[in-house]
Amino acid sequence: MASIVIATDFSSHSRRGFDAGVRLALDLHADVVLVHAFAGPGPSVGVAGGNVQRDILEHVEKQEMEDVETLTTQWAEDARARGLSVEVVAKETDPVRLILGAVDEFDAQMVVLGSHGRSGVLRLLAGSVAEAVLRKSRVPVVVVPPVRSD
């Protein structure tokens, strides 16, 4: 059966991508692979009392893992409630690598993701997952743009 990778960062922009991907999956009778990459606690900073710092970082990482699990479960259940088969891939890694890896692992025919619509200096500083996936993907990529309030 065909499958579609739907990438999310759980923002309102990625929710638009998720909803579009679910509609496509329904229309194409495809399975869904819901993908989310998250950052770890990041580089440590020099703070007196290393045990306190380590405890804080472990707490932040544990909370993020719980949030990711809750959100992926909710979004996956939303798609399942519409009659779709859903696999979830959530890992602490680079989002572009995870998305493209899921395409290969599940032999997906398409990637769908929402875009924040960043441009200029902000895009240069923050990077663009959508742009990188578009450049590197071996399958078609649907990028759902943000709603403009001009």
Image (cartoon, rainbow, N blue to C red):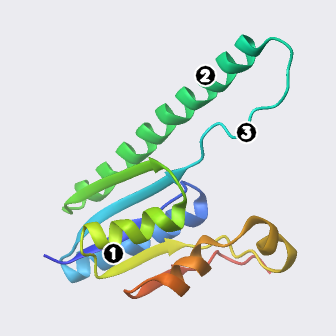
Q: Are marks 3 and 2 in contact (CB under 8 Å)?
A: no
Q: Position of residue 7 (x, y in %)?
A: 45, 65
Q: Nearer the viewer, mark 2 or mark 1?
A: 2
| Residue 53 versus residue 72 in the image, above or below | above
Disc 2 residue crowd, few under 14, some 14–19, many 20+, Cα 10 Å:
few
Secondary structure under the numbered disc 3 in the rendered image: loop
The residue type indicated by label 1 comes to: Arg
Quadrant location of residue 129? bottom right
Sort mark 3 into few (<14), some (14-19) or many (20+) by Cα contacts within 10 Å: few
Residue toward you, 150 or 111: 111
Residue on which the image places disc 1: 23
Where is 50 relative to 11, above or below? above
Marks 1 and 3, the one that precedes in the sequence: 1
Q: Residue at x 74, y 74 (%)?
A: 118
Q: Amino acid at mark 3?
A: Pro
Rate crowding at label 1 as few (under 14), some (14 to 19) or many (20 or more) other CA atoms within 10 Å.
Answer: some
Q: Nearer the viewer, mark 3 or mark 2?
A: 3
Instruction: Of the two numbered discs 3 and 2 on the same chain, state the one appearing first in sequence.
Output: 3
- Of the 4 image quadrants, the one containing the C terminus is bottom right
Q: Nearer the viewer, mark 1 or mark 3?
A: 3
53 on left or right of 142: right
Residue at (56, 35) in percent of width and height = 64
Residue linked to disc 3? 43
Q: Which residue is mark 2?
A: 59
Name the residue: 58% across, 78% down. 132
Is any atom of residue 103 visible in this view? yes
Q: Secondary structure at mark 2?
A: helix
Task: Calculate the distance from the C-alpha at mark 3 to the C-alpha at mark 2.
Answer: 15 Å
Q: Position of residue 96 (x, y in %)?
A: 52, 68
